[in-house]
Image (cartoon, helix red, strand yellow):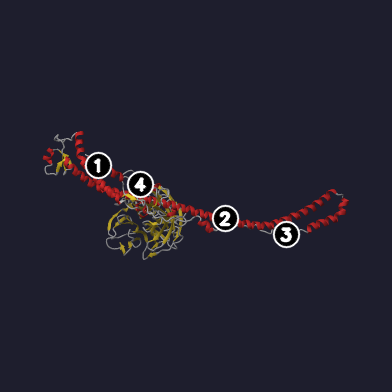
């Protein structure tokens, strides 16, 4: 027992030596100061964060001031304390093991013995295979071939296993504390840098203000000196004028008093004397000498460079690890502004899919044209209602696909693509190229891979221009009467209005189906013309010209419904020729006989009509990628452009071209059917 007491006393003294004087706990990651006193790393971090001067720390034991240029983590590790900790841990474990049988026996006597629920016998055996306590009967019945032992004997073995499993946890704990310490240190560094930069900014501003005040004082001194010189001359002239005025007033008063008080005989007798006195007083005055010699020409010439530079006195160079993992999540639709600029919204997303909000002054953007390598500088004008969404304006040099390069706080984000549509603000346009050799092109459409498909009404054919030229119809089993409208389905089939029917072809020119016949009922047509497919529900809309209506077919070309009748009221038609549908599913019908364009919403309710300005003899109609509406005026040789609300933008001259059918491709290029050719327009 005496030996046991001495062992416990030694262990207590060793524990005292291993106790940090700051936190009063066993040392964790001990670090040694130059004064050879040791403390926990976290305790030193805490002391450093409370100190006003972040570069110095005061030893809690001897108060020695220690400069930490590299932070707490650079201090040497107290290896002697770590060795003592290991010895202490071993002695402590040994003492716990020696005490454990007594504890176990005491616990058994103080608490009730666990009983097997199946056999009502004490649970005195531990099955290591099943990792559970069992009774002796359970061992014989179910655990005979398992590894098992009495609880008293198995206890120490399981304790050692648990202690060995605890080692990785302790290592993770140490590593986590080190990481936490590094985070605290980095936090302090960022705070110190931020405070230092703010102090530098204030000092720079104070210096600028001081220089401005000094410059202002010099300017004020110059003004005072100029005023003094000019006022000296003015003062001399004023004194001379006052003296002259005194003489004149004296003569004037003398003459007036004489005229008032003296009798007529005396006035007449002294007339010559009075005249001479007035003449002498006036003769000595030179009014030119009394006119101001100095001019009031004091002006301040402002230094515009100083005024402009005062709005931007510097910039901070910061890199954000979060920005390097951010990207452009979404690019909104392009809108053309009236000053020939375009605008679109950009949504920035952080690495955690959250909106990325950046000050406007730290955002820079430009567009790069893919094929021409044209660079267009863009301006981030504002952040709109939603967080992380910004409005961008620019004046692109051409239409088509562009790459958006976004720079936030000097970090270039992952680029995104954008389609700049054809500009509606051009006064006149010239074709980029033409496709000639046609008889009378009526309708045009462009496939997803860029092939141009044209209905040649007089040649009774459909022609394809792409990597190779193909002609459908005219010979063989496939024949057309007078093909007019043409549209491409979402699954790449060709729909063509032809005489009194609608023909469906595959991309190889083979007929898949043919529906319709002459008449005015369901799927009966009279001169079907324009055709369009809704991007929302894939319904097929056909301008049934001589039936003065729009007939609607399902995607499988079965009849759905029709709307409209002959007349000039809203929702009525007189020879509708062409039809087009925007991205929202709204329907635009070229009401040729009524000289107007009618718009219907996706539910086919009448919205408004466009007539008069910009609409004379409407024929072809097309909607671009930004939902601007282009109307071909066949007789006027121009195309009119309207917003989706019906607002007239302008008319574009085609220089002698009479447009019929219109179409846009996905790049924003405009295709125009005219006379005997197809004209292709870019910006």
* Left or right: where 144 falls relative to 219: left
Look at discs 3 and 4 and give the one toward the viewer: 4
First-in-chain label (1 vs 4): 1
Identify the residue at horizontal 36%, vertical 66% (top origin).
Answer: 437
Q: Is residue 520 visible?
A: no
Q: Which image quarter holds the C terminus?
A: bottom left
* Left or right: where 479 falls relative to 340: left
Image location (x, y in percent) of residue 172: 28, 49
Name the residue carrying label 3. 289
Disc on res. 43: 4
Q: Residues within 10 Å of mark 2 (few under 14, many from 20)?
A: few
Determine contact: label 3, label 1, CB under 8 Å. no
Q: CA distance from mark 3 to mark 1?
A: 121 Å
Of 51 and 462, nearer the camera is 51
Of 433 and 639, nearer the camera is 433
Disc on res. 6: 1
Image location (x, y in percent) of residue 254: 81, 51
First-in-chain label (3 vs 1): 1
Q: CA distance from mark 4 to mark 2?
A: 54 Å
Look at discs 1 and 4 and give the one toward the viewer: 1
First-in-chain label (4 vs 2): 4
Q: Secondary structure at mark 4?
A: helix
Disc on res. 75: none
Q: CA distance from mark 2 to mark 3?
A: 36 Å
Look at discs 4 and 2 and give the one toward the viewer: 4
Q: CA distance from mark 1 to mark 2?
A: 86 Å
Q: Is residue 188 visible?
A: yes
Name the residue carrying label 2. 216
């Amino acid at each position: 027992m005496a030996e046991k007491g001495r062992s416990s006393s030694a262990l207590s003294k060793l524990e005292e030596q291993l106790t940090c004087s700051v936190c009063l706990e066993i040392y964790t990651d001990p670090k040694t100061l130059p004064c050879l006193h040791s403390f926990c790393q976290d305790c030193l971090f805490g002391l450093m964060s409370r100190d006003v001067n972040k570069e110095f720390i005061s030893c809690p034991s001897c108060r020695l001031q220690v400069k930490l240029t590299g932070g707490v983590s650079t201090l040497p590790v107290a290896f002697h304390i770590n060795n003592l900790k290991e010895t202490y841990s071993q002695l402590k474990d040994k003492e716990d093991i020696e005490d454990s049988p007594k504890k176990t026996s005491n616990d058994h006597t103080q608490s009730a013995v666990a009983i097997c629920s199946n056999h009502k016998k004490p649970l005195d055996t531990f099955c290591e295979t099943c990792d559970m306590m069992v009774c002796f009967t359970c061992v014989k019945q179910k655990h005979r071939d398992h590894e098992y032992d009495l609880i008293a004997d198995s206890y120490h073995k399981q304790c050692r296993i648990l202690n060995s499993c605890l080692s990785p946890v302790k290592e993770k704990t140490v590593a986590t504390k080190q990481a936490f310490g590094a985070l605290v240190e980095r936090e302090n560094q960022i705070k110190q840098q931020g405070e230092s930069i703010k102090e530098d900014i204030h000092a720079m501003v104070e210096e600028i203000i001081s220089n401005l005040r000094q410059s202002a004082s010099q300017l004020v001194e110059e003004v005072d000196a100029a005023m003094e010189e000019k006022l000296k001359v003015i003062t001399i002239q004023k004194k001379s004028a006052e003296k002259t005025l005194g003489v004149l007033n004296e003569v004037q008063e003398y003459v007036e008093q004489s005229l008032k008080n003296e009798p007529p005989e005396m006035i007449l007798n002294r007339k010559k004397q009075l005249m001479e006195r007035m003449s002498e007083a006036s003769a000595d005055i030179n009014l030119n000498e009394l006119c101001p010699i100095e001019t009031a020409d004091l002006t301040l010439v402002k230094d515009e460079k100083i005024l402009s530079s005062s709005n931007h006195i510097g910039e901070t160079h910061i890199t954000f690890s979060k920005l390097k993992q951010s990207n452009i999540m979404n690019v909104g639709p392009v809108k053309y502004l009236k000053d020939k600029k375009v605008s679109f919204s950009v949504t920035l997303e952080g690495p955690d899919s959250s909106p990325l909000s950046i000050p406007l002054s730290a955002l820079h953007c430009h567009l790069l044209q893919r094929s021409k390598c044209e660079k267009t500088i863009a301006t981030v004008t504002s952040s709109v209602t939603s967080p992380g969404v910004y409005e961008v304006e620019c004046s692109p040099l051409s239409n088509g696909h562009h790459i958006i390069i976004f720079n936030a706080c000097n970090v270039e984000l992952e680029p995104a693509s954008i389609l700049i549509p054809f500009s509606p603000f051009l006064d006149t346009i010239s074709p980029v190229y033409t496709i000639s050799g046609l008889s009378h092109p009526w309708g045009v459409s462009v496939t997803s891979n860029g092939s141009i498909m044209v209905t040649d009404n007089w040649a009774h054919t459909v022609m394809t221009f792409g990597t190779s030229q193909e002609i459908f119809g005219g010979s063989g089993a496939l024949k057309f009467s007078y093909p007019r409208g043409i549209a491409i389905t979402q699954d790449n089939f060709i729909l063509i209005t032809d005489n009194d029917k609608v023909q469906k072809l595959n991309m190889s020119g083979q007929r898949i189906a043919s529906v319709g016949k002459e008449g005015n009922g369901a799927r009966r047509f009279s001169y079907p013309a324009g055709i369009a497919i809704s991007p929302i529900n894939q319904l097929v809309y056909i301008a049934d010209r001589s039936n003065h209506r729009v007939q609607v077919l399902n995607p499988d070309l079965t009849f759905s419904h029709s709307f409209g009748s002959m007349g000039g009221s809203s929702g009525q038609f007189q020879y509708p020729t062409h039809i087009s549908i925007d991205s929202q599913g709204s329907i635009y019908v070229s009401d040729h006989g009524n000289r107007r364009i009618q718009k219907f919403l996706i539910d086919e309710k009448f919205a408004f009509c466009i007539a008069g300005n910009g609409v004379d003899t409407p024929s072809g109609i097309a909607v671009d990628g930004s939902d601007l509406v282009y109307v071909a005026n066949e007789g006027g040789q121009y195309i009119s452009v309207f917003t989706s609300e019906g607002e007239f933008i302008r008319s574009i001259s085609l220089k002698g071209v009479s447009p019929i059918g219109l179409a846009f491709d996905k790049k924003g290029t405009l295709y125009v059917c005219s006379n005997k050719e197809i004209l292709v327009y870019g910006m």
